[in-house]
Structure formats: C-alpha cells, structure tokens
Amino acid sequence: MVYSTDGGRAAAPKTPRAGSPGQQPVRQPQSAPRVPNDGIVRVSRDSKRRRGKTVTLISGLPGDEATLDALLKQLKQACGAGGSRDGRLLEIQGDHRERLQAALTALGHRVKLAGG
C-alpha cells in the first residue's frame, strides 16, 4: 500500500497491459523433472523434506495404479518397513536399496542404483 494525501485512500498499483514494453513475459511454472521412460527401474535414497528421515525411492516402474499398489505392498513386506506411493514413485521407509534391488531383479525388472 502506498501513502496518499487523497483522503487517506491508497491508489491501486498500476498493472501493465499485455504486450506493453515494460512488462516481463509470463513464465509457466516448471513441472517436476521427468523420469526417463527407458525400461530401467531406478532405486535411490533420499532424506530431503522429511526432517532427516531416510526413504528409498523407486521410480520407472511399468504398470497401472493397481499394479503399483500390489508391488508396493509386496516390497514393504520384503523390507519389513512402511511406505507409500506418490503418483508413479514408490517410497519405502529406511535405506533398503540393496534388498529392493534384489527383489525387483527377481521379479524380472532391470534395476539400477541411482544417487549416493
């Protein structure tokens, strides 16, 4: 708000019209980075935005939502841990990369350990 001597009312800020020379181009928000669809299942470890708790992320899995839910349940039982599904990304609580790599390889997937 800007101070005004006009009876205490503040003037509305001017907004430039579309196409005017002083206006910045409108940028579309960038979407999340896409996971390559190359047939390789990537297993990585992450602790960002989780108050320091480590989770194992699994991305690049084929199938529909029901298939991913069934696979998530099977992988959680194999690790003895909890987890969830966020879109096509599976999250297993804790660092279980090697165990998940072995389980997914036994199911016939090409698995690559990603990240550190």
Image: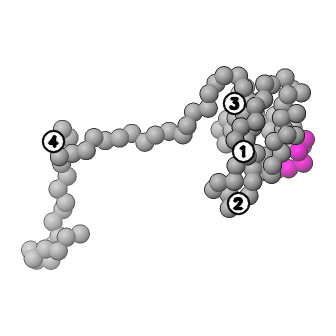
Image depth: mark 4 or mark 1 in front: 1
Q: Earlier in the sequence, mark 3 or mark 1?
A: 3
Residue 95 rendering spot, x and y as whole percentages: 81, 49
CA gap between label 2 and label 4 equals: 47 Å
Relative to 46, residue 63 above or below: above
The residue at which mark 3 appears reads as 60
Is residue 99 in view? yes
In which image quadrant can residue 51 be found? Answer: bottom right
The residue at which mark 1 appears reads as 116
The residue at which mark 2 appears reads as 52
Q: Cβ–Cβ below 8 Å for labels 4 and 1?
A: no
Q: Secondary structure at mark 3?
A: loop
Instruction: Report the quarter where the N terminus lies.
Output: bottom left
The residue at which mark 4 appears reads as 20
Q: Earlier in the sequence, mark 3 or mark 2?
A: 2
Q: Cβ–Cβ below 8 Å for labels 3 and 2?
A: no
Q: Write the start and end of the magenta stretch as one range.
A: 77-81
Q: Secondary structure at mark 4?
A: loop
CA gap between label 4 and label 1 equals: 48 Å
Which amino acid, by three-letter code, is at mark 2?
Gly
Q: Earlier in the sequence, mark 2 or mark 4?
A: 4
Examine the structure image and report whether residue 49 is included in the region drawn in magenta: no
The image's colour scheme reads one colour
At x 70%, y 49%, the residue is 46
Image depth: mark 3 or mark 1 in front: 1
Relative to 79, residue 64 above or below: above
At x 64%, y 24%, the residue is 37
In which image quadrant can residue 35 be found? Answer: top right
Q: Main secondary structure of the magenta part?
A: helix
Is residue 65 in view? no
Which amino acid, by three-letter code, is at mark 4?
Ser
